[in-house]
Amino acid sequence: MESNDVRALGICGMGGVGKTTTAKAFYNKYSHIFDVSCFMENVKQYSQGDSPLLPLLQHLLTELLRAKDFEVRDVESALRKLGEILSYKKALVVFEDLDHSSYSDLLVRICKLFSDGSRIIITARDLNLPNQLKVEMSKVDTYMVKHLNEINSLELFSYHAFKKSKPPGNYIALSKSFITYAGGLPLALKVLGSSLCGRTDLSIWKAKLEKVKKIPLKDIQKILELSYDELEDDTEKAIFRYIVFFFVGKNITEAVDVFKSCDLFPEAGIPILVERCLLTIDLANRLQMHNLIQDMGRNVIHEESKHARFRRLYLDQEEASPALPNLGTPYDEYNCCGRDRAAVVAEEDGVAVPVSEWDL
């Protein structure tokens, strides 16, 4: 904050981890020391349509000038006006929820307009976006938002469930089970805690815990699915689905060999999944992902398998049973029912063939 050059910061992490909350806390604390400031929420909304840049610039200028009726005719005149403002004023601008579609029409065209002492903050689920910005700017840093530890998780959950920092004694054990399930993700802790607020019957708490383990809450899944939906092609999505189904906890070499044989180009796809915070690789070179990301992936597989013509992944006995009789082999021989084991059945034009079987 003390340096007089133009700097940018990318605040990155998986959906629901607190990127926007962190950016807002910074903005609220420091915006008063800048000549002009603006918090651009949900930048992605401007990336829709044939000419997304003009409404975005219109909103940016309106916020910077604090003028509700300010209008610009076209993109070039808007950029000129923006240049006039930023060339002599120290600015703080936050762009929230960036993705590739909004990046090319946004940062590349305006980052050079900022004057000394200005700060640009972007929040994104894609670690590569700050790296792309480094092509245009020399001072770019990345902050990965960390998951909450057990103490902070319990405090956040308790605040939403009980409106105080600690749960009552008889709720402590169940509260800890919920925070274990949430895995330190603030969004999940908030949604789960709020859903239990005012409920005093412990049997309801126990039933809720069992339910969310089998049927994840839609509010959480919807946020997490955005990262999957924004993957650029079908090979990346396929790699993600197969990792969810087969390879969590497996060595990356084992997965890469399989994906290569399927022409899925894992050398390109796996790094993108890591950049999009859908996947991590631990020190033992094993593929790992947050349990809520894996739940989201299972839900995606379940929904997409209803409509897929070719490869279908059957997650339970009820789904697999109608296909397996086509094989002429009893289902029991595949030992793939339940949540602990699964079989992949490749369905080619309605004819099912077993592909493989793995521990989930």
Image: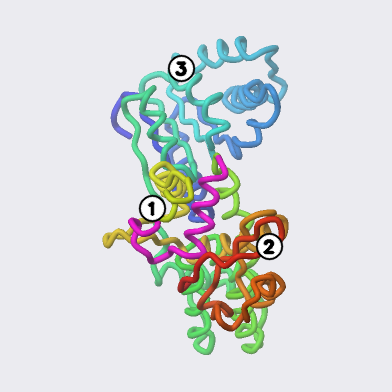
Q: Residues within 10 Å of mark 3 (few under 14, many from 20)?
A: some
Residue type, numbered disc 3: Leu
The structure residue drawn at horizontal position 44% and vertical position 31%, both measured from the top left corner, is 120
Q: Residues within 10 Å of mark 1 (few under 14, many from 20)?
A: some
Q: Which mark is residue 351?
A: 2
The structure residue drawn at horizontal position 49% and vertical position 45%, both measured from the top left corner, is 125
Residue type, numbered disc 1: Val
The structure residue drawn at horizontal position 65% and vertical position 54%, both measured from the top left corner, is 310
Q: Which residue is mark 3?
A: 113
Q: Which mark is residue 184?
A: none
Q: Which residue is mark 1?
A: 256
The Cα–Cα distance between marks 3 and 1, rounded to whole angstroms, is 43 Å
Earlier along the polypeptide chain: callout 3 or callout 2? 3
Toward the viewer: 209 or 342?
342
Residue 249 in the image, given as x and y percentages of width and height: 38, 66
Above/below status of 28 relative to 209: above
Which secondary structure, mark 3?
Answer: helix
Q: Which residues are magenta?
A: 233-256
